[in-house]
Amino acid sequence: MINYDDFLSHSAEQMKESAIRRMGTVLAQSRNTISFAPGYPAPDTFAWNDFTEITRDLLTGVDGSVLQYGPTRGYKPLLEEIAGIMTSRGVTSTPDQLLITTGSQQGLDLVARVLLDPGDVVLVELPTYTGAITAFRNVQASMVGVPQEGDGVDLAALEDTCARLLREGRRVRVLYVVPNFQNPTGLLIGLEKRQRLLAWAERRNVLIVEDDPYRELYFEDSTTEADVRPIKADDASGRVVYLSSFSKTLAPGYRVAWIDAPAPLAAKFEMAKQAEDLCTGALDQRVVYEACRRGVLQRQLPLLRRHYQQKRDVMVEALTREFKDDLSWPSPRGGFFLWATLPPQIDSDVMIARAVENGVIYVAGEAFFVNGAGRNIIRLAFSAPSHDRIREGVTRLGETVRQELAAIEAVAR
Amino acid sequence: MINYDDFLSHSAEQMKESAIRRMGTVLAQSRNTISFAPGYPAPDTFAWNDFTEITRDLLTGVDGSVLQYGPTRGYKPLLEEIAGIMTSRGVTSTPDQLLITTGSQQGLDLVARVLLDPGDVVLVELPTYTGAITAFRNVQASMVGVPQEGDGVDLAALEDTCARLLREGRRVRVLYVVPNFQNPTGLLIGLEKRQRLLAWAERRNVLIVEDDPYRELYFEDSTTEADVRPIKADDASGRVVYLSSFSKTLAPGYRVAWIDAPAPLAAKFEMAKQAEDLCTGALDQRVVYEACRRGVLQRQLPLLRRHYQQKRDVMVEALTREFKDDLSWPSPRGGFFLWATLPPQIDSDVMIARAVENGVIYVAGEAFFVNGAGRNIIRLAFSAPSHDRIREGVTRLGETVRQELAAIEAVAR
């Protein structure tokens, strides 16, 4: 028998299965389970007819490049569309700053590989996106968490943490933030704070990695486009690496996202991408390009904002009815997630078994914390299920929590 | 001004642009250039009508998962099809051994990240595939080359090299080979040698990474299916990590390939893939699955064998006519490539500028050698251009070489 552990790299020894992905596997095993776990967009919002038409137009065989290998940087017309999107977000980008990635997850992985050596510090929000944690862990970076306030990362804590690390002789390279409708908290970084973050990064000579997949999905009852202005829009010195994606607005099945970064870094991301997958899918990129060019994306955005805002409303209403004061959360002003704190005696990871039994799943909060916190928190994605399924799922969740509390009490007695 | 070099990881400092990808960029800049550079399949062989029909059937919106995130391992029905393909190649695979990758390039990258630490030795053939070199370089592995004979890697040299490295205290983990119609040489490893390689790996406790994208493209005038039997087919102890792909048989624009590996390694590849791109494109996987299920792939294979064999014939005939004895090559028995040695005074990398001027491109041999050899060799891909373009390209190449020889002579005088 071969002992494969002998063959693993240090990085591989530390690799773990993602909690979100694991929930995806649970989900795939039972159709009746209601999932608040992975942040899946709602497939009934996808522009199926447009995609059918676009694909038919593309697959005639007249243009062989539609199914061929392509440049690592990406399909040029799509890069030009993305430059236009960046302009509309307040960012001027030249072609040497843009790179198409196979989903934003690849963007995070490229960032990790190009910017971080084993032991280098990357500062992250407490909590932060698990996919980023995985990418940073796989290059053996050292993640250090910074608490958040109602308007995002706590600047005083950020400065204290950084100062302490530097005193300890650590190399602090990167601050990773999700400023708009953060995964998992749903929080926004305030506009003034974005400016101050940038000034802080300048002073401390740190790069900001700004991960922005949800910005188009702001809820118009409480948020305007002005509130989601990228940090990168005010980045005069080239300190921000910006990531965004079509996964939440067109469809994740097309793995098409992008990085907007200072040109010397974009060139390195391109080289890293060459080794990772040569290029992003040719057809996928062309479909996304056509969806931009033909106005499908623009037409979708207001519909999506309303769609997800309504689902947020349905979930908030159901949770309020079901839990009264046993659950609290910051009200999401956009995005896919509601970040709910349970009574302190509950361990949300332990409770998953009971939740699965009751036909509902979520992601346990701990997965989002690099400091082991979040034990009694859960992330609920309201994006994919129908209104009825959201209500029914919340009922099942309520039942689960009541059973769990009763069981804990029984043990205590 | 920010000095971005200060922010690069050690790995990023060493990253280089791939020679093949660079030629792709040159190609994209001029339509009239005849390309023997990137190993692109011929788009006129793609099953455009079938793809159109399949995609129309998939994009009805009835099944939302068609454009959704999916399991990292891959789309289950496709994994089952792949198990069937492996069976037809003589390999029995259980589901926990299979993983779908975003092209075989991702497979190579996952292999590198999971199996190699900085400084670990990976043994490679002289010459070897550049994409593998890039993936191994990006994890800072140390590549050591082993010469090839007419029937593939030289076993005596392999043993000597390995013994020397072990004496030097190096960690030798992996042997990387492309046994069928190797990129770039077009060589096959002989059947008996495959067995002996396996026995050698057993004795030296090394894993074999078997990269097999071209096996279906054997030329029936000289090669049978028996000749392309995977090393993995005789791997009783689980020592072989096997990679293959649909890129050369269906289309590379769908980025769909797979790994077949011992289950404990496959689990680690899955975790590494989670961080790299979450999952391979959902629609791409379904199109490939349907192309398997509906018999499109099976129907294509004999057509492709004939198609590329004819192109090989056209190129060989043109080269013989154009060069007489100034060029020599092992005759390809399958695949996409012809590996041609020029007169010794020529530096094929230097000659590229003149070739581009004359409207033809190739890949200079040096890119495929980890020991700096290959200065007067070129890799010619006959796969994509039409018969006429192959003939015209060879004429331009002949002109280029004659000019280069004259220029060298002029300088020498």
Image: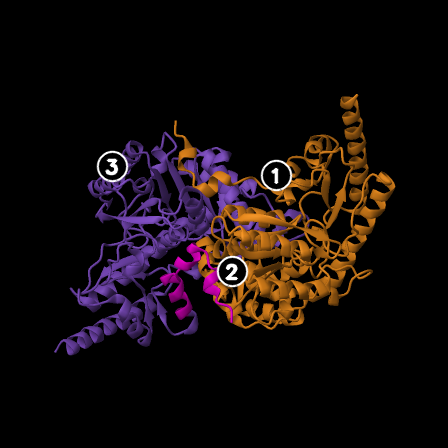
Chain colours: A orange, B purple
Q: Which mark is residue B192?
A: 3
Do the dots labelled 3 and 2 sit on one chain? no
Image x and y of residue A387, in percent? 80, 47
Residue at point 83% right, 43% down?
Answer: A319
Q: Secondary structure at mark 1?
A: helix
Q: Is residue B81 visible?
A: no
Q: Which residue appears at 23% of the width and 43% of the height?
A: B161
Specify the segment rendered in magenta: B1-27
Earlier residue among tags 1 and 2: 1
Secondary structure of the residue carrying tag 3 is helix
Question: Is B361 left or right of A260, judged from the image as shown?
Answer: left
Label 3: few (<14), some (14–19) or many (≥20) C-alpha neighbours in 10 Å: few
Q: Residues within 10 Å of mark 2 (few under 14, many from 20)?
A: many
Q: Looking at the picture, does residue A222 appear above or below residue A347?
A: below
Q: Is residue B346 above or below residue B169?
A: below
Foreground: disc 3 or disc 1: 1
Q: Is residue A242 left or right of residue B257?
A: right
The residue where tag 2 is placed is: A282
Looking at numbered disc 2 in the image, what kind of residue is underneath it?
Ala
Q: In the figure, A116 relative to A300: above or below?
A: above
List the residue tagged with mark 1: A22
Q: Quadrant of residue A107?
A: bottom right
Quadrant of image for the C terminus of chain A: top right
Q: Nearer the viewer, residue B22 or B361?
A: B22
Subunit of label 2: A
What secondary structure characterizes most of the magenta part? helix
**Left or right: A45, with A55 as reference point:** right
Measured from the top left, where is residue A407 in percent x and y? 77, 25
Q: Report, in whole angstroms, how far the alpha carbon at label 3 lies from the one at label 2.
A: 40 Å
For disc 1, the chain is A
Q: Amino acid at mark 1?
A: Arg
Quarter of the N terminus of chain A within the rendering = top left
